Structure formats: C-alpha cells, structure tokens
C-alpha cells in the first residue's frame, strides 16, 4: 500500500471508529507498527487535520479539512437535516441556534442541485412534547468540557438532599428526561451521571484535568457498557 493510500485510510478510520481511538487499535486497523502510526498522525496534523490526543491517551479527529460538504450523498444530507433539526428542538437556546447556523453554512457551500435537496429534505423532525430545559446555563458547562476544567456543583439528589461537590465534566448527554453530565466526582472518587435539572449551580474553576480526560471518558464508557446501563442517569 502506498503511503498516500495509507494516510487516506487512516483518515477514514479516524472518522468512523469510536473516539478516542487508541494507537494500538489504529495500528491494527492499518496493519502497521505503532511507531509508523505515530509518524502518520504527525503527517496528517502537518497537512491541516486537527487530531487531539497523544500516545497512551487515544486520538480524536476534531477538525477534518479534507472532507468538504460536497462529498455528502443524498442520504447523508438527509441525516444531517434530521440530526440538526432534532438538536434545534432538544438543545438549549445556544445549541439550537448553532444547529440552525450550521445547517445554513453547510447548505451555502453545496452546489445548487444539492442545496435544493437539503432545503427540501424528505425527512422532518417535530416533537409535540419538547423537554422543558431546567438547570444552569449550559454554555458554562460546555466551556468547562471544552477547556477540560473542573466545575463546582450544587446538586440535588432524587430525594431533594443538596450537596456541593467538585467534578471533572467529561461529556454532555441528551436523555429522555433531559440533558445530563457524565463526570468524575472528586467527592465520591467515582464516575457519576448528573441531571442538569437537578443542578442549582455550576461554577467554573481554574483546576485543569486535561491530562486525564481521554482516559477517564474511555473508562467511564467501558464501565457503562459493562453494566449494560447505557447512559441513563445513576445515583450521584
């Protein structure tokens, strides 16, 4: 296999494999040594692909400059319309506006024929009972996830008891009962799932957990799969 073909195949693997994906998994997928895999990752980064992660932590493709919207086929565009339409109805105000803006930007970059397809998609989303959002400002929680900084929560459990705790926010999930937060709880020294509706306060801190986020999230997801509990909120 030529090097250019291998790099193309590596980009495809980064797009489709569950992330973060370990170097060992990528090397096995590519049928190369991990040393070669590390060199290929650096080559892709040098060409403009934004790939987060490092050896031992796993890799996440966060920006792919090699995949223009023109490569979407019709069913993929239908999927985009359905997904972004659902975000517009389920997300908080900031996320709903971002979904609308994203769809408009994608449509603007498409050829005229595909613009008509995306504007007249055959799939629609309408929720008669939209979940009422409760809880703190989601933008601050999102920023803490992006910046990999701890949050100080004031949280009510199912019985109404209030506790204050510091958590490492790993990911926001959207559940039937509303949005939740997957996090490492410093008080319990364990993974916890917090419902946004039970948060009275979520204050950002200066504490960074950046070296640990990928490992913690991978361990949390592995634990949830082992328990067979999906992402339903457990006791906090």
Image (cartoon, rainbow, N blue to C red):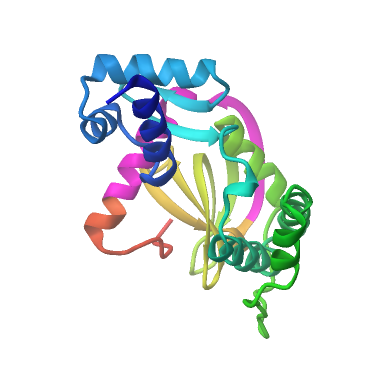
> Is residue 127 left or right of 176 when viewed as pictured?
right
Q: Image point 75% across, 47% down: which residue?
A: 109
Residue 23 locus on image (x, y percent): 29, 27
Q: Residue furthest bottom?
A: 128
Is residue 78 visible in the rendered image? The answer is: yes
Residue 27, given in percent of the width and then of the height, sits at 25, 28
Q: Quadrant of residue 119?
A: bottom right
173 relative to 67, above or below: below
**Residue 121 colored in magenta in the image:** no
- What residue span does the magenta drawing correspond to? 200-222
Identity of the residue drawn at 43% across and 25% down: 53
Considering depth in this image, is 17 or 155 the residue closer to the camera? 17
Which image quadrant is residue 113 in?
bottom right
209 up-or-down from 196: above or below: above
Q: Is residue 202 magenta?
A: yes
In the depicted view, which residue is nearer to us: 41 or 87?
41
Q: In the image, 51: left or right of 111? A: left
Provide residue 8's location: percent of width, then percent of height: 41, 31
Residue at image coords 41%, 21%: 41
Q: Position of residue 146 (x, y in %)?
A: 60, 35
Left or right: 55, with 68 as reference point? left
Q: Is residue 31 above or below residue 76?
A: above
Q: Quadrant of the C terminus?
A: bottom left
Where is residue 97, by image quadrant? bottom right
**Is residue 209 in view from this perspective?**
no
The quarter in which the N terminus is drawn is top left
């Amino acid at each position: 296999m030529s090097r250019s073909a291998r790099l193309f195949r590596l980009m495809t693997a980064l797009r489709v494999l569950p992330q973060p994906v370990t170097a060992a998994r990528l090397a096995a997928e590519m049928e190369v040594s991990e040393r070669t895999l590390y060199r290929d990752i650096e080559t892709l980064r040098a060409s403009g692909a934004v790939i987060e992660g490092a050896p031992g932590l796993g890799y996440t493709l966060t920006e792919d400059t090699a995949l223009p919207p023109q490569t979407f086929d019709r069913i993929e565009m239908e999927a985009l319309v359905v997904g972004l339409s659902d975000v517009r109805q389920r997300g908080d105000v900031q996320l709903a506006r971002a979904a609308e803006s994203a769809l408009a930007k994608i449509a603007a970059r498409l050829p005229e024929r595909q613009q008509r397809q995306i504007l007249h998609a055959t799939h629609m989303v309408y929720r008669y009972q939209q979940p009422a959002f409760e809880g703190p400002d989601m933008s601050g929680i999102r920023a803490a996830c992006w910046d990999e900084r701890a949050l100080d929560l004031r949280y009510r459990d199912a019985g109404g008891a209030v506790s204050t705790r510091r958590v490492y926010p790993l990911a926001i999930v959207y559940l039937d009962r509303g949005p939740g937060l997957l996090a490492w709880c410093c008080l319990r020294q364990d993974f916890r799932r917090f419902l946004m509706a039970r948060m009275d306060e979520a204050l950002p801190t200066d504490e960074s957990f950046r070296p640990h986020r990928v490992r913690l999230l991978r361990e949390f997801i592995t634990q949830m799969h082992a328990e067979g509990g999906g992402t339903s909120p457990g006791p906090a």
